[in-house]
Image: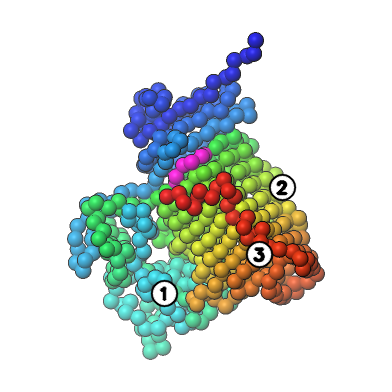
């Protein structure tokens, strides 16, 4: 007689359930935390997968959902958190704003209590923080005054604005961005001299002079007097009031107006010696998370979303809504990350054997996916390495909406990482960036794959980036069968290069093959990049600052038609384009 198959275990959760229930389909729990507790009692004796099924609806999170080693699948089986088939479970860090009243000049206003936020959404549409000039325009600053550490702009009406300490001066600096809170200003004949608050001021004047140029693009943000077009908003912190100018026929008494009230929705965090493993999240929506650090100490980027902290050189990252640290055998599939005030997903440190497949990232203030936030060239402890990661068939669009140096997919010192068949478009800076360190020495980097991606309408605001960008030696890395097109330099960008593929400082040991590059300012830019092989990748190219020993091979009969037709999402995932 054959042994009986072990029955799988499922717990059910519903926004209308009750945590006193047994967690069955007929009597579900109400909270994910209650299901998490139930799962932990079963994992040590697992003989099959355990699934937590979330019924459709909004799960209002009061705090970050936290998972650790106790939530791991055991005995080779997975613990799976997923939406009920055909339904959408929405994990929200937002707070709904109600009680709107009419103010002067057609504005609506409401009390928000102690909540502080930098994003506002009306009926699922991101509103614009009040600014001048109005989006998508910028102004041009006159110069940086190095002696006084002030920024000089043309004369402005800033003196008539109320709540000046809340005003931010936002400057595009080639591939970086500064958000500088205004401390004081002085009108002179030669212009308006603006002194930023600290530590913003120190951050702004750190680094290379070539990032502080005349005529750089800027705008002012966050004053009530700037609220002059429908869809703009302003938060007056001292009185705990938000003001909004409705669009068209919007009725705020009926509208769903959301503001984020927590910064991280999901934190899966193991330890180096005790990682989280065999855990899956499938078909969930993560939305309405914020990030308020720029309101507290300004915002300055060194590159990508690596930011400066305080007044001494130190680096951090834009906060992510979903974070994995010291985790392996993780599945993150068919999820949606949207309406976020920071980055979408971070695979931080010690993350291996992870699959990020078929997810949608849209309407994000920061980057889409970030791999390796430790950014260490070497580590004596292999438990801290990020490797054996698959990032495939993800749709990444409309990111970097607040922090324009953000990247669709960023990977630091990674190895054996595959970035395949993703569709990335409408981003202000680089589509895919792999590598860190600006070095031709051996590091943890190596043998990565960037294959079959479709990348277009990136680099819409910034300069010195590309559809695909690399840094440092990474022998065995392949960039192949990607379709990169329709890159157009913004009039507000700096003068640094913009190209389809950009091999930057120290990039070596890389093979580029069969990439289709069309309607781009420059096809391939090699900047202190040596010993790379370019095969059947046709387009203009430039070698600069010691680039050498790069070989070019071309088969005149080779066709790129297959690359154009097969790049981007594979057939099983093309439905991501139409999901609402």
Other-residue count near label 2 (Cα within 10 Å), few / some / many at <14 / 14–19 / ≥20: few
Query: Can residue 410 be seen here?
Result: no
Image position of 482 (left or right of 316): right
Read off the magenta span: 281-286
Mark toward the viewer: 1 or 3: 3
> Residue 496 appears at what percent x and percent y?
59, 75
Residue receiving disc 1: 137
Identify which residue, 189 or 108, lies in the foreground. Answer: 108
Residue 380 bears which disc, if any? 2
Circle 2: element type: loop
Q: Residue at x 50, y 77 (%)?
A: 491
Image position of 181 (left or right of 565): left
Q: Name the N-terminal-most of marks 1 and 2.
A: 1
> Residue 123 appears at what percent x and percent y?
33, 53
Residue 516 bears which disc, if any? 3
> Residue 100 appears at what percent x and percent y?
22, 55
Q: Name the N-terminal-most of marks 2 and 3.
A: 2
Residue 77 position by quadrant? top right
392 within the magenta span: no
């Amino acid at each position: 007689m054959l042994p009986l198959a072990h029955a799988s275990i499922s717990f059910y959760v519903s926004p209308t359930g009750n945590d006193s229930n047994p967690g069955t389909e007929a009597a579900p729990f109400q909270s994910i935390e209650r299901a998490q507790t139930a799962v932990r009692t079963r994992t040590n004796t697992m003989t099959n997968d355990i699934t937590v099924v979330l019924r459709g609806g909004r799960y209002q999170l009061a705090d970050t959902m936290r998972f650790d080693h106790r939530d791991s699948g055991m005995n080779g089986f997975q613990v799976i958190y997923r939406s009920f088939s055909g339904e959408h479970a929405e994990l929200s860090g937002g707070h709904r704003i109600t009680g709107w009243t009419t103010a002067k000049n057609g504005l609506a206003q409401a009390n928000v209590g102690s909540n502080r936020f930098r994003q506002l959404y009306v009926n699922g549409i991101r509103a614009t923080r009040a600014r001048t000039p109005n989006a998508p325009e910028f102004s041009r600053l006159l110069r940086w005054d190095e002696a006084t550490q002030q920024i000089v702009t043309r004369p402005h009406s800033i003196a008539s604005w109320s709540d000046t300490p809340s005003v931010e001066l936002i400057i595009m600096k080639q591939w970086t961005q500064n958000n500088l809170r205004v401390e004081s200003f002085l009108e002179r004949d030669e212009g308006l001299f603006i002194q930023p608050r600290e530590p913003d001021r120190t951050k702004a004047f750190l680094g290379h002079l070539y990032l502080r140029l005349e005529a750089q693009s800027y705008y002012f943000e966050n004053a009530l007097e700037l609220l002059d077009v429908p869809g703009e908003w302003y938060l007056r912190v001292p009185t705990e009031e938000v003001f909004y100018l409705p669009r068209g026929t919007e009725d705020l008494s009926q509208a769903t107006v959301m503001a984020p009230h927590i910064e991280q929705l999901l934190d899966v965090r193991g330890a180096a010696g005790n990682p989280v493993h065999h855990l899956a999240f499938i078909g969930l929506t993560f939305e309405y998370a914020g990030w308020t650090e720029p309101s507290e100490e300004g915002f300055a980027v060194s590159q990508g979303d690596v930011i400066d902290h305080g007044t001494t050189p130190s680096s951090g990252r834009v906060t992510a809504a979903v974070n994995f640290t010291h985790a392996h055998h993780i599945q993150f599939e068919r999820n949606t990350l949207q309406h976020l005030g920071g980055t979408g997903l971070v695979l931080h440190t010690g993350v291996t054997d992870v699959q990020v497949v078929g997810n949608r990232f849209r309407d994000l203030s920061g980057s889409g996916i970030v791999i390796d936030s430790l950014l260490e060239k070497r580590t004596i402890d292999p438990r801290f390495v990020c490797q054996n990661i698959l990032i495939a068939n993800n749709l990444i669009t409309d990111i970097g909406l607040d922090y324009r140096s953000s990247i669709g997919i960023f990977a630091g010192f990674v190895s054996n990482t595959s970035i395949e068949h993703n569709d990335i478009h409408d981003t202000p800076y680089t589509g895919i960036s792999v590598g860190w360190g600006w070095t031709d020495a051996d590091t943890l980097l190596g043998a990565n794959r960037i294959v079959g991606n479709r990348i277009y309408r990136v680099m819409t605001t910034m300069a010195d980036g590309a559809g695909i960008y690399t840094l440092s030696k990474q022998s065995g890395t392949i960039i192949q069968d990607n379709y990169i097109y329709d890159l157009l330099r913004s009039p507000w960008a700096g003068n640094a290069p913009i190209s389809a593929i950009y091999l930057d400082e120290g990039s070596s040991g890389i093979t580029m093959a069969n990439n289709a590059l069309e309607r781009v300012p420059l096809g391939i830019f090699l900047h202190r990049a040596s010993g790379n092989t370019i095969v059947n990748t046709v387009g203009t190219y430039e070698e600069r600052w010691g680039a050498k020993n790069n070989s070019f091979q071309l088969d005149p009969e080779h066709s790129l038609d297959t690359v154009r037709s097969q790049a981007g999402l594979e057939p099983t995932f093309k439905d991501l384009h139409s999901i609402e």
